[in-house]
Amino acid sequence: MANMNLLGAGNWLGILSTILIVLCFYFSLSFFQHLKTGEERLIKQSKFAAVFCLAMSLLIPALYSLFIYNQMMK
């Protein structure tokens, strides 16, 4: 029964990761738009948001797989 819960969490984390990748793409496009207009504050904010979303979208599945691997070894 515990494996059923872990599989359900993996599906939701996959959806979250996909949403974060889409947000990363959105903030990247916003970054280029603000770069063209020259608004420094918005450039920094959109760049940080894009990098943060990309990092989270890559780290969440990696950390979850390490957690599952650790649970399987017990």
Image (spheres, grey):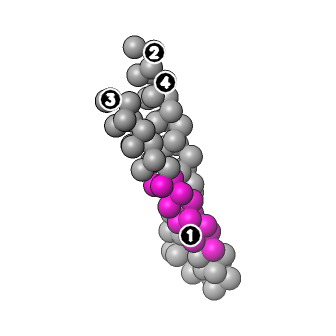
Query: Residue at point 50% right, 49% down?
Result: 14
Residue 13 x/y as whole percent: 45, 48
Q: Nearer the viewer, residue 45 or 55?
A: 55
Q: Earlier in the sequence, mark 2 or mark 3?
A: 3
Q: Which residue is mark 3?
A: 2
**Cα–Cα gap, marks 3 and 4:** 14 Å
Q: Which residue is mark 4?
A: 69
Q: Which quadrant: the N terminus?
A: top left
**Which amino acid type is marked by label 3?**
Ala
**Cα–Cα gap, marks 2 and 1:** 39 Å
The residue range painted magenta reads: 15-29
Mark 3 and 1 residues: CB-CB less than 8 Å, in contact? no
For discs 3 and 4, the disc positioned in front in the rendered view: 3
Query: Number of numbered discs present?
Result: 4
Mark 2 and 4 residues: CB-CB less than 8 Å, in contact? yes
Q: Earlier in the sequence, mark 3 or mark 4?
A: 3
Query: Residue at point 50% right, 33% down?
Result: 65
In the image, residue 39 sits, relative to residue 51, either above or below, namely below
Q: Earlier in the sequence, mark 2 or mark 1?
A: 1
For discs 3 and 1, the disc positioned in front in the rendered view: 3
Please rate how many residues cluster around mark 4, counting C-alpha atoms within 10 Å: few if below 14, some from 14 to 19, many from 20: few
What label does residue 73 carry, if any? 2
**Which amino acid type is marked by label 2?**
Met
In the image, residue 69 sits, relative to residue 27, either above or below, namely above
